[in-house]
Image (cartoon, rainbow, N blue to C red):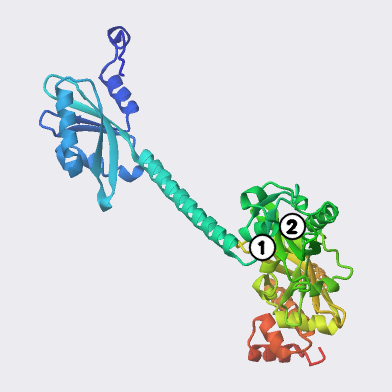
């Protein structure tokens, strides 16, 4: 509903032509004055600089020549409505621009004299069109995500219900069942719908309930796979409860498998005897590997860094699947651990399953002979402003002090050359020591060809014992 001024003759009677023109220009983004012959007589606009040359060129042109063909019928209707004295209405008109672009404008048309001249006051609709386009894109993205989520849920539900294993998913804080597949519900003689929300420990005989509750509490406390042998309700057969803590986004849940083969210990049980003095629930991430660097066991802290919901997704994979060694190769690292028993502190980066890179400080040790695991890695994330391991080398510090004393005595280019030589020699010597004087491995670590390494060894006089 439009409502005009009640007393324009009183408030606006002293407004001259310049003031009226300024008011109209301020109230619109683009203003066109069109004569009775539908030719553009005057123009005012406050559009962006990209249109500063295009819009003034409309002056003296027929209005139809600067309006998109699809908007011509609407433009003619707008002019007829204005010249007939009808109240101003909104009309969305599109103007073609160079390069196939469009300038959408919402006009209000008003007759300004009896000769048929009309003023078109327009508002630039490009911000609105851009916002609508973004909203449409976001809506399509949300719909696609919702579709993918429904598909993933359907796949999960199909696998969960048709798998040959009896599976139960629990809330670790309350010990209540969130979901159970048909095979698990048949084990207890309860329908899947009736299983949801019940205490898992309450499904067993009262004598076993405290043991089951303590078992679930242990899974939550240490964050690693736990197993417990129990009897089915009513003194039935023995089964093995195999429980593991996993993440679903920010939610932590417990997955319990009900195994009939009580004597089967599984492939992940062997490393448990190798944990020794390592703290399973430590804030530091801990990994146990075999002779070839294949992961046998990983604690909850490493799973958090690697963005993995289950330890099973790490077990059996190579360390190279997760780590970036900063030029150091896995075989060189393991060779040094075998030779020296441990590598005390070095820098690395963990590639998470979701693409995140976490900078870490690591230490590697050789496990006792005869244990299933051969190597152990302990690491902690490094803060963004924390220096990388190995920085602050005392030789470099002494070199820097010597350089300061030489400033003013030796030209800068000579200082830079000498400093580069010192650092290069130290890097080569450190790489040789790290690789046990294996020149092929040293060349790979330094990113050099063998020929380039030999030239540098000869230049610096580094022997096999160096």
Q: Which mark is residue 97?
A: none
Q: Residue furthest right?
A: 277
Q: Nearer the viewer, mark 2 or mark 1?
A: 1
Q: Residue at x 71, y 79 (%)?
A: 330
Q: Is residue 135 left or right of residue 409?
A: left
Query: What residue is pinned by disc 2?
Result: 383
Q: Is residue 10 left or right of residue 329?
A: left
Picture quadrant where residue 189 is located: bottom right
Give the percent coordinates (x, y) of residue 323. Answer: 68, 71
Picture quadrant where residue 228 is located: bottom right
Give the percent coordinates (x, y) of residue 318. Answer: 68, 76
Q: Is residue 437 above or below residue 159?
A: below
Residue 88 visible in rendering: yes
Q: Residue at x 71, y 63 (%)?
A: 258
Q: Earlier in the sequence, mark 2 or mark 1?
A: 1
Q: Is residue 414 left or right of residue 109?
A: right
Query: What residue is pinned by disc 1?
Result: 166
Give the percent coordinates (x, y) of residue 158. Answer: 54, 60
- Name the image quarter holding the N terminus: top left
Q: Secondary structure at mark 1?
A: strand
Q: Nearer the viewer, residue 447 or 295?
A: 295
Picture quadrant where residue 418 is located: bottom right
Count the marks: 2
Categorize mark 2 by other alpha carbons within 10 Å: few (<14), some (14-19), many (20+): few
Residue 34 visible in rendering: no
Q: Is residue 217 above or below residue 462?
A: above
Q: Is residue 31 above or below residue 238?
A: above
Give the percent coordinates (x, y) of residue 145. Answer: 49, 53
Q: Residue at x 81, y 88 (%)?
A: 466
Q: Nearer the viewer, residue 464 or 85?
A: 85
Q: Secondary structure at mark 2?
A: loop
Mark 2 vs mark 1, CA separation in Å: 43 Å
């Amino acid at each position: 509903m439009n409502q005009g001024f009640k007393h324009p003759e009183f408030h606006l009677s002293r407004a001259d032509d310049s003031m009226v023109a300024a008011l109209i220009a301020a109230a619109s983004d683009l203003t066109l004055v069109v004569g009775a012959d539908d030719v553009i007589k005057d123009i005012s606009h406050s559009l962006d600089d990209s249109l500063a040359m295009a819009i003034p060129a409309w002056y003296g042109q027929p209005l139809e020549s600067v309006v998109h063909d699809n908007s011509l019928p609407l433009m003619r209707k707008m002019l007829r409505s204005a010249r007939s004295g009808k109240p101003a209405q909104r009309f969305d008109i599109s103007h073609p621009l160079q390069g196939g672009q469009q300038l959408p404008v919402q006009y209000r048309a008003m007759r300004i004299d009896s000769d048929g001249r009309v003023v078109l006051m327009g508002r630039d609709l490009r911000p609105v069109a851009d916002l609508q386009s973004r909203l449409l894109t976001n809506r399509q993205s949300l719909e696609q995500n919702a579709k993918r989520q429904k598909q993933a849920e359907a796949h999960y539900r199909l696998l969960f219900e048709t798998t040959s294993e009896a599976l139960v998913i629990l809330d670790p804080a309350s010990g209540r069942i969130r979901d159970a597949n048909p095979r698990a519900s048949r084990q207890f003689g309860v329908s899947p719908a009736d299983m949801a929300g019940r205490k898992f420990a309450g499904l067993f005989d009262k004598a076993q309930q405290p043991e089951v509750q303590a078992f679930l509490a242990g899974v939550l406390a240490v964050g690693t796979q736990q197993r417990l042998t129990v009897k089915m309700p009513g003194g039935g057969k023995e089964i093995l409860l195999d429980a593991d803590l996993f993440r679903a986004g920010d939610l932590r849940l417990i997955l319990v498998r009900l195994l009939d083969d009580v004597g089967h210990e599984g492939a992940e049980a062997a490393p448990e005897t190798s944990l020794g003095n390592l703290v399973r629930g430590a804030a530091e991430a801990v990994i146990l590997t075999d002779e070839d660097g294949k992961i046998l066991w990983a604690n909850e802290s490493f799973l958090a860094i690697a963005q993995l919901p289950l330890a099973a997704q790490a077990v059996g994979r190579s360390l190279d699947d997760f780590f970036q060694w900063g030029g150091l190769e896995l075989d060189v690292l393991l060779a040094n651990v075998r030779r020296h028993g441990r590598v005390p502190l070095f820098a690395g980066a963990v590639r998470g399953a979701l693409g995140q890179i976490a900078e870490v400080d690591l230490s590697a040790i050789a496990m006792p002979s005869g244990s299933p695991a051969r190597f152990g890695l302990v690491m902690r994330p490094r803060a963004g402003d924390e220096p990388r391991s190995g920085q602050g080398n005392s030789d470099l510090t002494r070199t820097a002090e010597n350089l300061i004393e030489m400033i003013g005595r030796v030209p800068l280019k000579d200082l830079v050359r000498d400093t580069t030589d010192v650092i290069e020699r130290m890097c080569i010597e450190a790489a040789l020591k790290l690789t046990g004087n294996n020149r092929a491995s040293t060349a790979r670590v330094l990113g050099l060809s063998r020929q380039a390494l030999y030239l540098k060894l000869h230049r610096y006089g580094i022997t096999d014992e160096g």
